[in-house]
Amino acid sequence: MKITLPYFSLTVKSILLFILFTSFHIRMQSQVVVVDYGKSYINVTKGANGGTIEVGDTLEFRSTFVVRCTSGCPAFVDSCAYYDTVKVGMSYIPNSLAVLTNEGKIYKSFTDAAGDDCGTRAGSNLRINLGFNTTDAPATAFRRGRIRNTHKPSFYGGTCIMVASYRVRVTASLNTIINTGGGAISYKPTSSAVPLFINFPYNNTMVSTNYGICTNTVGTNSVGAEFNGTFGSGRPRNRGTSASVPANYTYNLFTTGGPQDYYYGIPNNTSTLTNYTTSNAWPKPDGSSPTHRVFQVWDIIGDHTGAVSPTAGNPAADTVANGNAGYMLVVNAAYRIDSAFSHTITGLCPNTYYELSAWFRNICSKCGCDSNGKGATNSSGPPFYIPTGPGDSSGVAPNLTIRVDGIDYYTTGNMRYTGQWVKKGFTYVTGPTQTSLTMTIRNNAPGGGGNDWAIDDISLATCTPTLNLVPSGGVNVCYGNQVDMYTTVRCFSPNYVYWTWERSTDGGATWSSTGFSGTGVPSLVAGEWQYTANYPSFLADSSYHLNMFRVRVASTAANLLNASCSFTATNQIIVWVNNCSWVLETELKDFNGKLNGDKAELKWTTDNEKEGVVFEVQRSEDQINFNTIGTVNGIAKGSGSSYLFNDNNPVGITTYYRLKMVEASKYKFSKMITLGKKSDRLEIRSLVNPFSSSINFQLASPLAGKAEIMIIDNFGRLIRKTTENILPGINSVSIGGLEGLSQGAYTLRIQAGNSIINKQVVKQNR
């Protein structure tokens, strides 16, 4: 926020200066002082990783006071001081009173005692007298001081940015709201004898468990506004304004000197309008005339959406060749602490965990300005530029708060410059009847040198449970035998406890409740909540043949009846009931297949063939209805052989094959194999998770090549590494010999070409 104060500067002191120093030309003129201010906090405990506020966390409150001048400069305000009280639910950390630079460095530190310096604490009351220029009415232990726009800590010599701070430890209970606002700054213009008070408003902040980002999500980029948080795409380098950016920020195009503080833009290429480029290789500072880089130092980048590497993001768009490049929001944060994005999201489910997140990037590596007012690109001295930190001259690090319905829930931590995008977010649970929320992203650090950032792919995603049905895929049973089925439900949170089994008798076209429902009692296993939902055992007969079973889970009984607020497994259990009175002499040793173009190539080997055995090759698109597409006669009476069959019909997205071995009037089915069209990206399918002795999954690949498959423990140690030759399409992969691994969570990492997949898997002993 800011206040503009006009006043006249003719004083006795200026007259004396005029007498003593004839080089000064004093004339009556109106001076305009602009005062900016705002209060924020950082979570010291969570550091650069960010997180929610938990019991025991250390917070550092930062109240920013900015004095700048727009005409008749220099100018000043007098009688400056900061006041605050330690709020309920917090305990003050002794002797933490300080004045910081806008980069968070300690400029002055104070004791709590009265009378020895400019800071004092009396019970829960805190005070810091401000203004430290020793030649210009400085503050003392007993007097408030003067702050001139040219005083230190300085921003390029023309603006003083001073941050009053102290630290507390959170003592409030979980799921309670604390006040991180309040406090005041006093000052007065020289034309007034009455101090003015800036009272910081109340600020609600939730104390909540830091769940982090959930590992299983659906509905990414579902915020609704701004093209579901992606900011859309198009050919123009600069898109129009955004209704989701509050009015306190002004839209601006990318020029050699903007967007300035208090401004934002929505580009697909952050180079300047006057010297377009797609390269980020220009020097910093870029002395070209005109420069390619905003302020000669900003990164030249593209957006994040759909990038091959999520951390590298997309390069700056070639708007000549690409007519539909993605946009991002870029903010040059203000001196004040305020909101940069806000939108109401509807259609939510009660008592449901959601991931609220976004991808951020610090876009300036040389925007620092030290307390002497010297910038990072200024090599002159002494005094020489003082870096932000070792090897870091980026200046003020972006630090953002995600608010829900006016309550702070999460802070990102300081995002230092890395030249990469980083995902930040947290998990939020809706209330018992809540179906909407307003998500706000607030700037939590003062502007000045740095705090220039991009945001893209703002996301609301549902944290979904993992449903592992056993037996996986289906069960072949003999008529009259017992069938046992169950599912292991694994949840990020312990709320998906309502379950019901569903059944389909028409190949999955329709589903109905079996009447078997219940409420799970989850326990924490390897970092996730888990329980088992059993289906009552039954004896297989013709009424169960080709029946499909699945489980539906939800967080409330009402949600279980709402398809939009409940979840089912992506796979089902199919029951095949066979006449097992027949025992075949022919032994099928192996059956597998691969894609040759878009055609299936099937191979199998046998042993101890009976004379006259026939192999019927069957194909299905739904795992239920199989059609015979060809027959192969056995050729190795009394011994074994290898066979090859080519299906001339193109394979669909997913196609299933099996063999029916026929000896006279008796027959037997092989296992079922799955083939599919090549994927447009590397992805894991049909992962059996948790695992016991082996990890089994299907790997869909767009290209042939080699895939490195690694198993990594929670300490980052490589446990197992293997290389698999993969073909375009679906590849079956099995990593065995894992019986000796300890129970717990592991990372399954697959790298093929430039693509990397990380998936959490859990070892569980049976």
Image (spheres, rainbow, N blue to C red):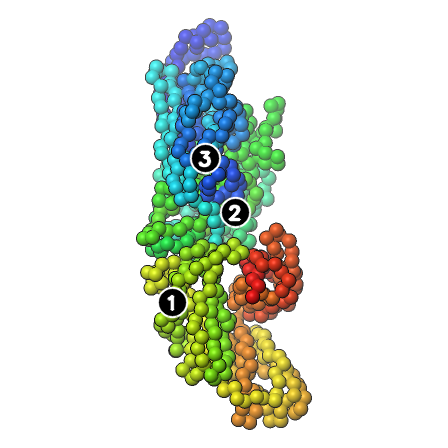
**Residue position marked by numbered label 2 in the rendering:** 422
* Image coordinates for residue 256, horizontal then vertical, percent: 49, 37
Mark 2 vs mark 1, foreground winner is 1
Are the two marked residues, 2 and 1, in contact with CB atoms closer than 8 angstroms? no
Nearer to us: label 3 or label 2: 3
Counting from the top left corner in percent of width and height, residue 534 is at 44, 69
Q: Residues within 10 Å of mark 2 (few under 14, many from 20)?
A: some
The CA distance from mark 3 to mark 2 is 21 Å
Element under label 1? strand
Q: Earlier in the sequence, mark 2 or mark 1?
A: 2
Q: Earlier in the sequence, mark 3 or mark 2?
A: 3
**Residue 392: horizontal and vertical position, in percent?**
59, 36
Q: Amino acid at mark 2?
A: Val
Q: Residues within 10 Å of mark 1 (few under 14, many from 20)?
A: some
Residue position marked by numbered label 3 in the rendering: 41
Few, some or many C-alpha atoms within 10 Å of disc 3 (few <14, some 14-19, many ≥20)?
many
Q: Earlier in the sequence, mark 1 or mark 3?
A: 3
Residue that badge 1 annotates: 517
Q: Amino acid at mark 1?
A: Ser
CA–CA distance in space, label 1 to label 3: 47 Å
Q: CA distance from mark 2 to mark 1?
A: 42 Å
Depth check, front residue: 703 or 643? 643
Under tag 3, what secondary structure?
strand
